[in-house]
Image (cartoon, grey):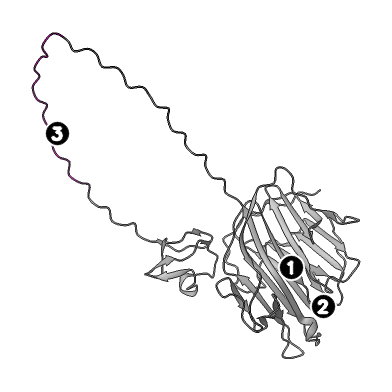
Amino acid sequence: MQRARHFAPRHSAPSRSLRTRSVVTLAVAATGLATAVWLPTRFDRAEANESSPTLEQVFADEFDGSRGDDPDPAKWSTDGQGVRLDGDGNVAIFARTERREREADAGVQTKQTFTSTAGKVEARVRVADGESVRSVFRMLGADDSRLNVADNRGNRSKVLRAALGKDVNGQFDSPQSLAADFHTYAVRWQPGQVVWTVDDREYLRTETDLDEPFAVALEVTAGPADQDRTARRMLVDFVRVSTAKEEEPPAEEEPPATTPPTEAPPSEAPPSEEPPAEEPPAEEPPAEEAPPAAEAWEPFTLYTTGQKVAFDGVTYEVLGTHTSLPGWEPPGIPELFKPV
């Protein structure tokens, strides 16, 4: 087992294109991979051990809707014109090649970002299958390193690829075409461990940490050599994200009740007269503090609902909790920021 380097966020600004740098990529490829770290002779079912953190689902889309509708604009940003619901509970991502000598692509990316030291990202996908077509399922982050889970390239692909940076590579040769039906591709991670699965069967794991912000993206790319319109379509049945469940602090115990002390019997001697105590001067009420000024918007920062941020001299109210990424400035994301 080879230990991969730690994923730490850099402060370089990635492009908003769906072909930008990625933390995790799901891919099915038609060619071999020379530097496989662990190539099992069979699928092993991925079982959660006793030390695995408890996960809770924080994002899901089943792509229900009428044929021809766009995916939920509150959840997704789209790239290219070939992204529509098919009316059967899937989103169809279709790379339209207008001219033979040009490459085309289309895809979707979550508007929400996620951060957790443990979690799971999964999607049920029927990959495209053209001669020069590529289907990709990714977790996009700010690091130049890549963790590939599956990437469909070529005609009738039977090879499932996975990689983490330049140090960890693996693949599984499927007995049947992975483009013939839907399969569930997933990445599960916790401190010191990342596991790749297909249809809940483990085929690669490595020792590392994934703890930087990421968004989820799916994309189809068609090269100029491919002219089969049907083969350029990828269908996605669902996308789900789960992160480590935060433990609630234990309830504070009430202090035990105490018995009041018994009163001493009155003394026979008359009480001595004491001069009345002087009343302390009345305290003036504290001056009201001015509300704190809005902090300047920064990338790679966790913002919570109701928080105020400043950008280009304008104050905005945060409409939804998220971790900011470069290119997600408040003026361009009205779903997350409202000028006040």
* Residue where numbered disc 3 is placed: 280
For label 3, the crowd category at 10 Å Cα-Cα, with few meaning under 14, some 14 to 19 and many 20 or more, is few
Who comes first in sequence, dot 3 or dot 1? 1
Tag 2: residue type?
A: Asp
Q: Is residue 291 magenta?
A: no
Report the front residue among 123 and 38: 123
Which mark, by number, is residue 129? Answer: 2
Res 63 → quadrant = bottom right
Q: Is residue 283 magenta?
A: yes
* Residue where numbered disc 1 is placed: 124
Outermost residue to the top: 268
Q: Quadrant of the C terminus?
A: bottom left
Tag 1: residue type?
A: Arg
**Could one spot residue 39 in this view of the protein?**
yes
Frontmost of labels 3 and 1 is 1
Report the front residue among 251 and 70: 251
Tell me which residue sits at (89%, 69%) in the image.
Answer: 176
Highlighted magenta segment, given as a residue range: 268-286
Tell me which residue sits at (57%, 49%) in the image.
Answer: 246
Q: CA distance from mark 2 to mark 1?
A: 16 Å
> What kind of element bears circle 1?
strand
